Image (cartoon, grey):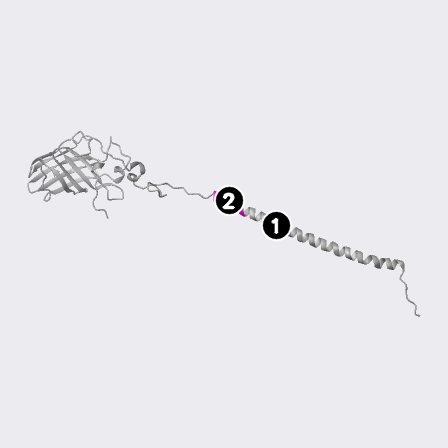
Amino acid sequence: MPHRPHLSLATAFALLSLPSSACQAGKDTSDATSSAETATSEGATSSSSSSSAAGTGTSTGDASTTGTSTSTTTDGSTTGLDPCSWYWPENLDYEFCPPVTLENAAVSGDTPLGPLDLRYARFGLQLCSACPTAYNGQLALYAAAPGDSPTPPAGDFLTFRELTSTSAYPSAGSIAGMQPDLFEVNVDLDAVLPPVEATSPPLDEGAPPLVTGTITLSGPGWAVSGTFSAPLCTPLDWSFACE
């Protein structure tokens, strides 16, 4: 029978202990891999949370710094105030008509209805512009003092519309209690009209805007002329057919 070799005790012990070391090494490697994966996962979660928090902070910051400065007008829109101060809320019902008690005109002469002597004057604005203006406004000449009343006084008077520095259109009148025929009356005017800035609020009754000048009325039976210095009276404001 052939001879079988026998393992020594030391060799056997070495063979028995080898698998245990290899398994432990494999286990350590697996545990390290698992720990790394766990750390990576936790790091990603932490990064995601930080990113989310940062995003939330950015969004909140944007919202807190957003704002618009506006002015509210009478119709509820959020636009700035109108450039014309007549249309500001506090001036919508504003009436300006200082008393006229001293003579501020000297317009006299002959008419088909008799002599005419007008000693007082006022003017009104034309409302068809972006801002009420004396240009194309109205001029009123009276025989009696209107005082503090915005309505024409009793007695002779003449009114003229579409007022410019060189012309005006006679629109109404009363002479000796009768209505004159103004159709053939020619008006020659040399007047100074105040600018829009001077006829817009705020206004001072002690120094009202004025239309000053000379006027001559001619035509069949008309020979009237003179000077005037008319303060603003807004109840005389008027408008034609605005486009």
Q: Is residue 57 magenta?
A: yes
Q: Residue at x 66, y 51 (%)?
A: 39
The dominant secondary structure in magenta is helix
Of the image marks 1 and 2, the number of the one nearer the N terminus: 1
Quadrant of the rendering where the N terminus is positioned = bottom right
* Residue 232 visible somewhere in the drawing: no
Quarter where residue 175 is shown: top left
Asked if 44 appears above or below 214 in the picture, the reply is below
Camera-side residue of 186 and 165: 186
Circle 2: element type = helix
Q: Residue 151: x percent and y percent? A: 18, 34
Which residue is drawn at the image coordinates 80% and 56% (left, top)? 20
Judged from this view, the residue extending furthest toward the right is 1
The CA span between labels 1 and 2 is: 22 Å
Determine contact: label 1, label 2, CB under 8 Å. Answer: no
Taking the view exactly as shown, the residue that stands out farthest to the bottom is 1
Would residue 96 be found to the left or right of residue 74 on screen?
left
| Residue 167 pos. (x, y %) | 16, 43
Which region is colored magenta? 55-64
Q: Amino acid at mark 2?
A: Thr
Q: Which residue is mark 1?
A: 45
Q: Residue 58 colored magenta?
A: yes
Q: Residue furthest front?
A: 1
Quarter of the rendering containing residue 8: bottom right
Q: Position of residue 82 (x, y in %)?
A: 32, 42
Give me the residue at 75% from left, 57% from top.
26
Left or right: 41, with 137 as reference point: right
* Kind of residue sitting beneath label 1: Thr
Residue 59 shows in the view: yes
Q: Residue 60, which numbered label?
A: 2
